[in-house]
Image (cartoon, rainbow, N blue to C red):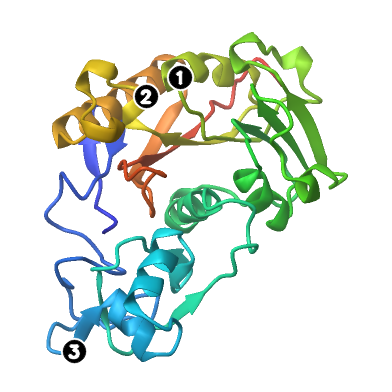
């Protein structure tokens, strides 16, 4: 998996390794494409030795067998630098800094998706959660909320249409405001403690085109918005392959463009998009979208 370079799409930037031939790899399943050491400490000089990630884990004593290594990788528990990689076949430099995170490190593997957003978008203007009022839409067990709390959020409203899903440790944090059993489509700014300065979203079984109008109506001026785009919930059931996988890359790009268009139509400035660092639970390719609210938001 590779982070891709920007491709202009109207006023938005759409990024995907499926669209671009130029990229700056942290790891790759086909080989490295450069001649410098990257931020993760992996040599991108193609003249140096590389090996499969699962093999590297066994060789370094981080897993007792390749099958165990593959399970750890698919669970999102193997990091290269600060980012997870979910392909056992990914080729890494033999001197790459690999580490394991315990299963309890974050309350869900979804946390690594949001960590990937902060890793990628910080240089493009995405501010830290530290000291900010945050809204987590589709909080579920609290993977995104966990990240926000650890990064110093002042308060996090954890909203989900389901009941009783939030991890007890997260729920007990005094900075967390639970909004369980609440459909985001019914929310107005008066339902929240205050207009959020940072909104993150990881929703399922609903298109983001229904969520974005609500986000635009409740955010504070200059708010940052990070959305996890799941093509399987954007393309329609008729376009899903076996196991609910969106196999056609053009359909995935259409889904991403649709969400970007919706965000722009509701006054959000789409800054950039990129591949999620790990796939969805069933192997679907997902994307991260970073947008910002206008300075003249009505929620001053």
Q: From the image, which quarter does the N terminus lie in?
A: bottom left
Q: From the image, which quarter does the C terminus lie in?
A: top right
Structural distance between the alpha carbons of marks 1 and 2: 6 Å
Corner quadrant of residue 75: bottom left
Corner quadrant of residue 68: bottom left
In the picture, the disc for residue 49 is: 3
Lateral position of residue 220 relative to residue 64, left or right: right
Earlier sequence position, callout 1 versus callout 2? 1
Residue located beneath label 2 in the image? 233
Structural distance between the alpha carbons of marks 1 and 3: 45 Å
Helix, strand or loop status at disc 1: loop
Tell me which residue sits at (27%, 38%) in the image: 14
Lateral position of residue 99 relative to residue 148, left or right: left
**Is 124 placed above or below 178 here?**
below
Tell me which residue sits at (55%, 19%) in the image: 216
Residue located beneath label 1 in the image? 206
Lateral position of residue 122 relative to residue 148, left or right: left
Helix, strand or loop status at disc 2: helix
Where is residue 199? Give x, y as percent: 60, 34
Mark 3 crowd level (few <14, some 14–19, many ≥20, 10 Å Cα): few
Where is residue 16? Give x, y as percent: 24, 45
Tell me which residue sits at (77%, 13%) in the image: 190
């Amino acid at each position: 998996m590779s982070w891709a370079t920007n491709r202009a799409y109207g006023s938005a930037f759409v990024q995907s390794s499926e669209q671009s031939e130029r990229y700056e790899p942290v790891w790759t399943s086909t080989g490295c494409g450069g001649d410098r050491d990257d931020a993760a400490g992996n040599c991108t000089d193609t003249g140096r030795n590389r090996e499969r990630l699962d093999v590297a884990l066994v060789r370094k004593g981080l897993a007792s067998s390749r099958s165990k290594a593959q399970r750890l990788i698919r669970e999102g528990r193997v990091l290269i630098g600060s980012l997870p990689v979910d392909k056992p076949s990914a080729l890494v430099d033999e001197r790459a800094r690999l580490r394991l995170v315990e299963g309890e490190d974050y309350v869900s593997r979804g946390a690594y998706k949001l960590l990937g957003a902060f890793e990628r978008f910080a240089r493009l203007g995405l501010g830290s959660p530290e000291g900010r009022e945050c809204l987590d839409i589709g909080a579920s067990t609290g993977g995104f909320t966990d990240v926000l709390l650890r990064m110093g959020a002042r308060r996090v409203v954890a909203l989900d249409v389901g009941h009783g899903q939030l991890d007890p440790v997260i729920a007990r944090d005094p900075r967390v405001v639970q909004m369980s059993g609440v459909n985001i489509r019914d929310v107005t700014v008066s339902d929240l403690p205050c207009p959020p300065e940072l909104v993150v979203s990881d929703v399922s079984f609903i298109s983001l085109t229904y969520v974005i109008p609500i986000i635009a109506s409740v955010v504070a001026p200059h708010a940052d918005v990070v959305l996890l785009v799941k093509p399987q919930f954007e393309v329609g059931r008729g376009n899903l392959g076996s196991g609910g996988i969106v196999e056609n890359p053009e359909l995935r790009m259409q889904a991403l463009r649709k969400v970007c268009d919706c965000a722009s139509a509701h006054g959000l400035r789409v800054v950039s998009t990129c591949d999620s660092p790990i796939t969805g639970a069933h192997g679907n390719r997902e994307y991260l979208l970073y947008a910002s609210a206008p300075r003249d938001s009505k929620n001053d």
